[in-house]
Image (spheres, coloured by chain):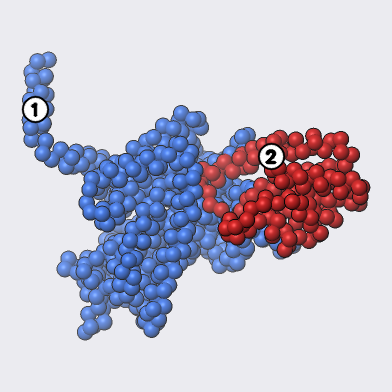
Amino acid sequence: MSKKFVVGYDGSEESRRAVDFAASQAKTSGAGLVVAHVLEWSPYSFLTPEELAERHKRREEELARAEKAVMGPVRENLADSGVKVETVIKYGHVADTLNLIAKESGAEQMFIGRTGQNGLSARVFGSVAGSLAQTATVPCTIVP
Amino acid sequence: MKPLFTAVAAAAGGLAASAVPAAAQSIDETVNQLFAGSTGWFVNFIFSPFPGTSFPWIVAWLVVAATVFTLYFAFVQFRAFKHSIELVRGDYSDPNDAGEVSHFQALATALSGTVGLGNIAGVAVAVGIGGPGATFWMILAGLMGMASKFTECTLGVKYRNEYDDGTVSGGPMYYLTKGFAERGLPGGRFLAILFSIFCILGALGGGNMFQANQAHQQIAGIVGQYPGWITGVLFAIVVFAVIVGGLKSIARVTEKVVPFMGIMYVAAALIIILMNADKIGWAFGQIFAGAFTGLGVAGGMVGALIQGFKRAAFSNEAGVGSAAIAHSAVRTKEPITEGFVSLLEPFIDTVVICTMTALVIIITQQMIIDPATGNYMLNEAGTAVATIDGNSGVSLTSAAFASAFSWFPYVLALAVILFAFSTMISWSYYGLKAWTYLFGEGKSKELAFKVIFCIFVVIGAAANLGPVIDFSDAAIFAMAVVNIIGLYLLMPIVKRELNSYVSRLKSGEIKKFK
């Protein structure tokens, strides 16, 4: 199995920097790049009966939109980078799911951007970078 | 033509002259009379007692069904209890299905449709009339009802319709049609249509007007009396915004607050019970003694039993078929897993929440005991147990909680209003599914039902239409008549699913993901 790096991507400027950095690292070490997009989702949230009935349809729509609006451009950008690129879209808690993707793809390293949030909201809700710093199962680079 | 015209004009004039001062009153009365006259037979039929007793046959119908399912599935509600909790926790959910409806979400949504007035006011009525012993029978009915829910929700998922656009529709009307056809039984379509009609009536009545009415009573109880239509219009606007305008945020807030309210209610009840820890043994003694002797309540042991059974059925809706509609949207390859999850519903609703209400009422000694005999004293009319200040229904629950926390009635009023709102949202969906089953899917058809639903919110809050409420309760129970006939005929299918699932679980073919 060839080497793989996972990079978290949500379409933001910060995550784009992480993808660029991860791509250059992957190129120098000859690794493939797994671009992962996680849609925040909790199985313990509350929905109305109507939302329950439409959930499967909405999920398909959300996946299609993520594929087109988020993954499409990044794949295009990386097309002539010389790095082998895979994309993964998953639902779940962002940090946990990135760990899971790293595990499933057998990745050696992980790259994420950071949103630069500080103060109250980061304290209350935590941050993806913060939790990955604590929980990552492979070396994780946080790209400023 | 002329004499007729004159006569009509004269009559109209006379009516106008005499009716002006009490116009609203007379409209209410007219509606009441018309409604009672045309639907009274139906209400009387549904709630009629067995000859020579005061035991309504519909209560026996529900309890017998729950007992049959309990025995037929060999006490599945106890055997599968642990597995049910593991399913809700997501232990068996494939992480690749994340983003789909989880077992927890289906359960939470179905629960917010059933937890409500039945748990607060209904239990107070049961204990107020049937004494503490009613609690025992209520818990028993709740435990048995778990098997009914298990049966109907399994079928709901198994025979749901999945459309090309990815949406689903499920519920008794679908399993009655498809399940009957699969077993080669006649009449499935007829029962499905009958069920849909009762479901629409139940949704507009018990799931809407009754809720709006009770919510108004609560608000009026705090801010003072004012016309009910004001509450009705406000509620209707919010309901309209959610079900027609697609304003999910309001619904989502409610769906979040309702479970919180439920937990807070149980927590407050537990605190009160612990504050009176020395009386817990005594309270359970009263419950057991009352269950078999009645402790002097009207109707004795049978009175306690009827009240307990009746209120449990009102509260958890097991066998009614409504929950099968809510549960059918879950994403699972195994319909039976949703059956397992749904059996937790009567447990949480009746065995936990209703019992808490009953214990608080008993332990705070709201009901007056004759010191000489140890039996409960009856009120002047001899119909119910005498209470401090003569409270009954929701005010009895309120007084019981207020005896420990003086501010609790305000929280309770808020809880009742929110429970009423979430029950309305749930039932608007149940009614809609029955409506689209009858008239077909389509934007304009759905809109028609939703607008009718909102109009009934106003009517329900504006007037105290006793016969209309009676009728809507009867309609909800009529759903159970149709649904349970279907469940009896389709239960072998559920058994097959159950056996297959259990053997695959044992062989390790069905694995935990966590």
Up the image or down, B367 lies above or below A7; here it is: below
Q: Color of chain B here?
A: blue
Measuring from the top left, give residue A143's x and y in whole percent. Answer: 76, 51
Q: Name the residue located 25 percent from the left edge and 78 percent from the top edge.
A: B369
Among the 4 quarters of the image, the one containing residue B367: bottom left
**Residue to which mark 2 is pinned:** A66
Is residue B306 shown to the viewer in this render? Answer: no
Q: Nearer the viewer, residue B297 or B315?
A: B315
Q: SS at mark 2? A: helix
Q: Name the residue located 80 percent from the left edge and 43 percent from the top edge.
A: A20
In the picture provided, is B291 more to the left or to the right than A114?
left
Q: Name the residue located 79 percent from the left edge and 34 percent from the top edge.
A: A76
Among the 4 quarters of the image, the one containing residue A68: top right
Measuring from the top left, give residue B145's x and y in whole percent. Answer: 47, 60
In the picture provided, is B314 more to the left or to the right than B334?
left
In the picture provided, is B184 more to the left or to the right than B9?
right
In the picture provided, is B244 more to the left or to the right than A16?
left
**Residue to which mark 1 is pinned:** B13
Measuring from the top left, give residue B125's x and y in whole percent. Answer: 30, 63
